[in-house]
Amino acid sequence: MNYWLFKTEPDEFNIDDLEKRGEKGECWEGIRNYQARNFLRDHIKENDLVFIYHSSCKNLGIAGIATVVKAAFPDPFQFNVESKYYDEKSTQVSPRWFAVQIAFKQKITPLITLSSLKEIPQLQSFPLLKKGNRLSVMPVSEEHWKLIEKIYK
DNA sequence: GCCAACGTTGGC
DNA sequence: GCCAACGTTGGC
């Protein structure tokens, strides 16, 4: 099993929205970055755990945990002309973009703030904290996951 | 294949 | 709203 971190802008979609989706969960679509796409397509498996990170907002930080309920499938939005995620260069035979389905597992209250994560020396190499990091889907090492777990457990 | 120009991300 | 950092595009 592997660990991940997904970013989301809480104004668009947040941990409470995910909780409301219940067991069915939410399709994590619209990822249009190749590195993130490769994680989604090749490495994220059913039952993996995901930190939900709230970005570009007032309260930055890890707001909860989700479970992957369905591994990679072609992102349906790339074929939808109406969608802002539409990609005319993508084909049904060879889709360019992928999505996964995740479901709510737990909320972390209060959330683990970005600033508190930065204070932990052992998290220096955590990709989220790297300057200029723009990945919206990133792996979390087991070591880092366990460290972060300790903060709220 | 290089790289300048551009658009986007995301913390501050 | 600013701007640094990064990814993508497209001309050459």
Image (spheres, coloured by chain):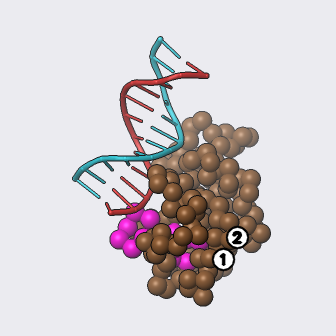
Chain colours: A brown, B red, C cyan
Element type at marker 1? helix
- Residue A133 lies, in percent from the top left, at 50, 53
The dot on residue A33 is none
Quadrant in the picture for residue A48: bottom right
- Reading the image, the residue beneath label 2 is A142
Q: Is residue A145 magenta?
A: no
Residue placed under numbered mark 1 in the picture: A146
Judged left or right of residue A118, residue A31 is right
Residue A97 at x, y = what percent?
A: 63, 48
The boundaries of the magenta stretch are: A51-64
A75 sits left or right of A86 in the view: right
Q: Label 2 crowding class (10 Å Cα cut-off): few <14, some 14-19, many 20+?
A: few
Of residue A45 and residue C4, the one placed in the foreground of this image is C4
Q: Where is the N terminus of chain A found, in terms of image quarters?
A: bottom right
Q: Do the residues labelled 1 and 2 touch (CB within 8 Å)?
A: yes
Q: Where is residue A123 in the image (x, y as percent from the top left)?
A: 57, 67
Task: Please give the chain letter of the residue carrying mark 1.
Answer: A
SS class, disc 2: helix
Name the kind of residue labelled 1 in the image: Lys
Q: Residue at x 68, y 66 (%)?
A: A141
Quadrant of the image containing the C terminus of chain A: bottom right
Identify the chain of the residue marked 2, using the numbered disc in the image: A
